[in-house]
Amino acid sequence: METNDIVLLAVTLLILGEVTYLLAKLPKTSIKSKDRAILVDTSVLMDGRITRVAATGFIGGTLVVPRSVVGELQFLADHADADKRARARYGLDVVSELQNMETVEVEILQDGSKAEEGVDDRLLTLAKRHNAVICTLDFNLNKVAVVEGIRVLNINELAQSLRMQYLPGEQMIVELTQKGQDSHQGVGYLADGTMVVVEQAHKHIGQSIQVEVVRSLQTAAGKMMFARPVERHTPKQPVSKKAEVVAKRVEAKQPAAAHPKPAGRSQSPQASHRRANDHHKAHQPQQPKVADKPQQQPAARPTQNRSRRRVDHEDNLLKLVNGQKDS
């Protein structure tokens, strides 16, 4: 082999190596993963619950973060208000956290740092082009994607389906089938197999009673609820308006109670003297009661007394004259 051929071969190999290196460094404009591609929206990254879902291994595909979504987070972190800035910076941290997880595969799709038509429209276009799924919390984007025939993964719907069927304070009817760990407890089960422990319900075992949920527990072994029986009170008879009006009239007719005079007011000397006499009489020994005297006849009139005196005087004169004649 001649020297020129060797040099030409070496140059060709060098060019191929440089081209390969450049191709490897070029941004990825298409999704390389063969698994189900899940396009992650800005709202999901700012929410942050995607990390806990990914840690459990329930993603079932490759999380694809478009470069336009990262650009929107960067824009919000620089120009939005304080609340949105904090949430946008937290969304950028979520992207880094997802990339460092071993249980999930993450790709950054280089579709441009800015979406001229809007991030929502860009996500819809990418989902149709790559036959991907959109993971979002945006209500409007969810509706539009369903209309366009694109499958949507909504974390809010996932949380709604996993929450407790009954919350504390709600009432339900449950059939108690056995005793609990304590002697006063009764245990029943819901249709989905959730255990309900009812306090102070041992006497209702074998019956269906209405209970009120006190608290709920979600453990790795399943769901469990604690409840208490609902006491049924007899409703009071309503009072008619006519009876209320009559009662008010009776109260209005009753005399008001005498209000005692305040001790701080000054009193007149006559009142003070009268109060002292009453006090003195109250402390004197009581005298024995005397029998009532017969009632006296009313005095005669003055004219009758005069006529009686005149008659007596005349009788005395006649007696004196008769006595002188006899002598």
Image: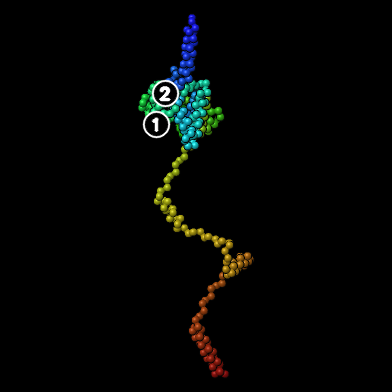
SS assignment at label 1: helix
The answer to which of 54 and 130 lies nearer the viewer is: 130
Distance Cα–Cα, label 1 vs label 2: 16 Å
Of the numbered discs 1 and 2, the one sitting upstream in the chain is 2
> Label 2 crowding class (10 Å Cα cut-off): few <14, some 14-19, many 20+?
many
> Label 1 crowding class (10 Å Cα cut-off): few <14, some 14-19, many 20+?
few
Residue under the point 46% across and 28% down: 70
The answer to which of 308 and 123 lies nearer the viewer is: 123
Total label count?
2
Residue under the point 40% across and 21% down: 130
Residue under the point 52% across and 21% down: 102
The residue positioned farthest toward the top in the image shown = 1
Color encoding of the figure: rainbow
SS assignment at label 2: strand
Residue under the point 51% across and 88% down: 310
Residue 323 in sight from this viewpoint: yes
Which quadrant, please, contains the C terminus? bottom right
Q: Position of residue 273 (x, y in %)?
A: 60, 69
Residue 141 vertical position relative to residue 241 in the rendered view, above or below: above
Return the residue at label 2. 133
Residue 267 vertical position relative to residue 126 in the rendered view, above or below: below
Return the residue at label 1. 140
| Three-letter residue code for mark 2 | Val
The answer to which of 89 and 238 lies nearer the viewer is: 89
The label on residue 3 is none
| Three-letter residue code for mark 1 | Asn
Q: Position of residue 275 (x, y in %)?
A: 59, 66
Mark 1 and 2 residues: CB-CB less than 8 Å, in contact?
no
Q: Position of residue 134 (x, y in %)?
A: 42, 25
The answer to which of 103 and 74 lies nearer the viewer is: 74
Residue 142 in sight from this viewpoint: no
Q: Position of residue 255 (x, y in %)?
A: 48, 59
